[in-house]
Amino acid sequence: MKLGRLFSLFLFSLSITLVSMNVQAQEVYRARLSPMPTTPQTVTDITGEGEVILTLNGNALSVEGNFSGMSSATTMGHIHNGPPAQPGPVVHRLEVTAASSGNISAELELTDEQVTALRNNELYVQIHSENNAPGELRGWIFLSSHFDS
Amino acid sequence: MKLLVDIRRPGLALLLSLGLAACGSESPSSVSTTQSAAPVVTFASQVEAGAEAYATNCAICHGANLEGSTLGPLLSGFSWVRRWGTQTPTLLLGNIQASMPPGGNENITEEDYLNIVAHMLQVNGVDGVTEALTASSNFVIEDSISRMVAQRNRPEPPAPEGLTVSGNTEDFIPFIPLTDAMLRDPNPADWPMMRRNFYAHSYSPLDQINTETVKNLQLEWVWNMHEGDSEPAPLVYNGIVYLINPGNVIQALDGKTGELIWEHWTGPANRQDMRNIAMYNDKIIQATTDARLVALDARTGEQRWETAIADNTKGFSNSSGPIVADGKIINGLGGCSRYIPEDCYISAYNANTGELLWQFETIAEMGEPGGDTWGGLDNVFRAGGETWITGSYDPDLRLTYWGTAQQKPWVPVSRHMTIYDVGLFTNSTVAVNVDTGQLDWYFQHVPAEALDLDEVFERVLVNRGDDKFVFSIGKHGILWKNDRITGEFIGFKETVFQNAFTNIDPESGAVTYREDIQNAQLNEWTSACPSSAGGKDWHSMTYHPPSGLIIAPLSQTCLENAAREIALVQGGGGVGASRKFFEMPGTNGNLGKVGAYDVDTMEEVWSHQQRASLHTGTISTGGNLVFVGDLDRRFKALDVSTGETLWETRLGTSVQGHPVSFAIEGKQYIAVTTALGGTSPRTVPGVIATEISYPRWGNAIYVFSLPD
């Protein structure tokens, strides 16, 4: 019994340590979603806002977010690969509510290259809509702490 | 798409062509079966179709009746006819096709543009045309405006001219001429020139209002100004406030009470931006929006002399006034994007007579030094290099320092040039001898500019020990530090995120454009930061001597840019690009930023960021305060040391212009204007921060002080 209790204690300590390591390894990112490039002629056609929180554990990326005020129902959501303010290709698909307001979610496995891109602010979220097939909302992903100052 | 217009009533054709472009699925051949129904296209039918096309594509910025708005200039009335009456529909068509609408024109056919031109001509009184316009309609526009129609369509009664309110400042205070010595070392109580001193410090040593007392600041008086676009920089001398209003109207007000003393309408009575005036001895010196220079008696407002800076009918204009250096009135010039033999210049005039003393041309022509940097283009097609922001002056070196704007059109491929055709002396700091008008040195910050990001803004002169520097920030948001004796590059600091350049050489300051920007072709979109609203724009930054900080009003937006084709046709030209705008990544949607930079280390000491864009210059004071105003009607005082907001109030509309501080009878005042217009720095936030609302009127000057 004594050995058993010691072993239990060891397992408990190990789990705490692993959880702690896991917490330490977690990186929280954020993307502020705002309208795609617009003009005085299109400003009332490309609308909305949103926020996405992305949590990285190892190569696993958990995505949770919301959006509202879009001009029409969403059709698709993606993560793209491109440095800040420079469009790039789709690298992951996101689940989005098919409405003008709703939620964004995904559980993704990033490649090592994509993790590096994430840490270099070279990934962004883009939401497409019926009225704006090329995209209506967009936001580059930065460490959440980047926005604290 | 051209075929579509040939087969329908033009109005229907326009709608159909735009609709098809929007869905992008139907080919021209699929509708060509109705060709037999083609009606005859006439000028009248073009006018009808043009009204619809204008409403769809232009009215949002230029107003439903071409009356203009804060997003775009008026396209009707006397000033428009003056500007375009001597031109042809072909040139007007080319100008519009090259530049409008700013967001892109992929859905607009040449026929649509012709219809819009017809509509504009009709609204402006053209009644002598019956045949349909074509791309080669080369009649002189004003020859087709009958006197009766022109009279009937005049949108407003004749504006007042000359002195409309008589008075004399000597009824308030004895007049003392403003001498060279007083300009060189201004009385702490005065703000006698734009940015207060020759070095452009925008700094007042007054300290009654300070970090401890500013919380008690309260409104002393307010004065409504004339409506229109405006970025005013009031002058205050000997207790009198001299105020430039829209419409080229100048007023003198008692600084203590806000009482109007005199008012002079120099005209033209338009709504175009004008920033500043100057004072010398007993004269107020005014540059007008139609490129004239006028001197008024500072006591009475009566006109003393007038001279032309440039020919307004050729597109030249002014949006900034002069600096007076050793009795010479030195003024820049704008509106230099047209393909004509005349180029842009800085010019100097005798302050007593208005006599022209010298001109320095900012465009190097063939055979001149720098003339081989324009890709072999004929001189007629070398455009840009505007000097639309007032320069500064070092009386010891006898050099005046100016920024120059970029080449025009905005993108090398539109200019029929490459990224290697740097185009001297555009986008540079130029140091010009005030006695001779000769170029002493230049430093080209961004050669062959490619995104409408000019480096034209104020040059701030700073002495540190025996070292003499000149600082500037252009639309790229890069704080440049140069030796102002030699022009040698000293250092730089990126004040906002920029991705136009992949490298800025720390030794030479040479910039390397991103490859896709270097190679951008016609109608190819490139995405870059900052946008054409700047980084930094016309809002002056301040140098605070006690702390050694430059404190700058900055902007955080980005753009997508696509070059348009511009033919090398004499009389043509333009800016030639489509643009779209978006939030700058990583800024959390904060468009406005006040940044403080140590002039020795070039490091950012603090920043104050906010959603609303900033629309005034920054000024600093001996009370360790920075004052700045924004689009959201807020006027704020920040702590110079920390950037903390110590006081703020909310005014009638967007706070825009250049604050000043002055004193009368030992009491310190802070004055700031509210205003509309302001070009890109207003247009761009207007499509990004759409939740910010403010009245589209309410130009005024507000004066604050501490309780007695």
Image (cartoon, rainbow, N blue to C red):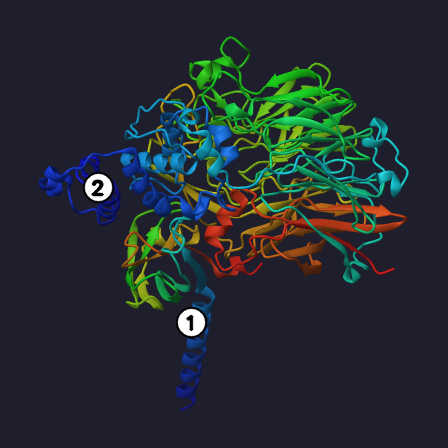
Residue that protrudes farthest toward the bottom in the picture: A1
Q: Which label is found at residue B429?
A: none
Q: Image height check: is A12 above or below A85?
A: below
- The foreground one among B108 and B632 is B108
Q: Residues within 10 Å of mark 1 (few under 14, many from 20)?
A: few
The number of numbered badges drawn on the structure is 2
- The foreground one among B453 and B141 is B141
Q: Which label is found at residue A18?
A: 1
- The foreground one among A11 and B203 is B203
Tell me the element at label 2.
loop
Callout 2: chain: B
Q: Residues within 10 Å of mark 2 (few under 14, many from 20)?
A: some
Residue that protrudes farthest toward the left in the picture: B33
Residue B249: which quarter of the image? top right
Q: Residue A90 location, x and y as percent?
A: 29, 52
- The foreground one among B45 and B243 is B45
Callout 1: chain: A
Query: Which kind of residue does numbered mark 2 sit on?
Result: Arg
Q: Residue A142 location, x and y as percent?
A: 46, 56
Quadrant assignment for the C terminus of chain B: bottom right
The residue beneath circle 2 is: B9
Residue that protrudes farthest toward the front in the picture: B148
Labels 1 & 2 near each other (Cβ < 8 A)? no
